[in-house]
Image: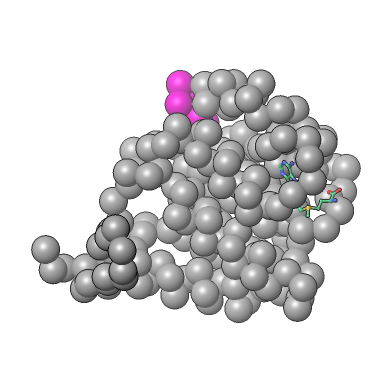
Amino acid sequence: MHDEPEVAVLRLGHRPGRDERMTTHVGLTARALGADRVWIPDNAGQSLETVRDITDRFGGPFTAELTDSPKGIIRDWEGRVVHLTMYGERVQDVEAEVKRAHGDDDEPILIVVGAEKVSFDVYEEADWNVGVTNQPHSEVAGLAVFLDRLFEGRELEREWDDADQRVIPMETGKRVEPADEE
Ligand code: SAM
């Protein structure tokens, strides 16, 4: 988020057909909940298009890119790596340490989420393997909870630049206006 060290999300693995919506939702959730960028596997081009289209319409800044070398992104990351996994340490036990690295030590954070079985080298490469509960669920849910814990709710207040349209919050009904109208 603005004025904070970068937070990036890496989607590791994508099974064409089966994972289309999940990969798209990893990107949309990363954007909506305060991450600065997402890397998506290069066999998920449609997900990339959707995330970029939403960013064009509803604003940024947010960077979405394809990668043909997700493991290379992890290896080359100049900061700390959080791998979200049901087998990891409990988020409530490690969040303070991650926030210290990000907030006090100005370390960029790379958050890795899987699709299918994640190979063991990722567990070894990560600075933290983090479970959002130790129950099996979804990369989208895990990412959402982790980002909200990392940003302590600041992401809910964020402003969006260069949006074409914005939603006016309403008790009932749907209202969307051109972004430059008051
Ligand atoms: N069974 C696979 C494995 O052994 O690695 C994981 C498949 S799961 C459907 C896909 C991704 O969701 C995981 O790689 C992980 O990033 C995320 N995930 C699922 N449950 C999680 C949990 N309890 N905490 C954090 N992340 C979780």
Could you say which is closer to the camera, residue 118 or residue 21? Answer: 21
The answer to whether any part of residue 155 appears in the image is: yes
Which quadrant of the figure contains the C terminus?
bottom left
Image x and y of residue 40, in percent: 63, 63
Residue 33 picture location, percent across and down:
46, 49
Q: Image height check: is 148 above or below 174?
A: above
Q: Quadrant of the N terminus?
A: top left
Question: Which residue is painted at 65% across and 65% down in the image?
Answer: 23
Residue at 43% over, 58% down: 62
Q: Which residues are magenta?
A: 102-107
Q: How many marks?
A: 0
Horizontal side of residue 153 vs 46, given as left or right: left
Colour scheme in the image? one colour
Give residue 59's quadrant in the image.
Answer: bottom left
Q: Residue at x 59, y 50 (%)?
A: 9
Viewer-proximal residue, 100 or 152?
152
Left or right: where does residue 114 sit relative to residue 94? right
Between 141 and 23, the one nearer to me in the picture? 141
Please, is residue 128 above or below residue 20 in the view? above
> Who's the residue at 59% across and 26% down the image?
95
Tell which residue pokes out farthest to the left in this image: 182
Q: Is residue 76 magenta?
A: no
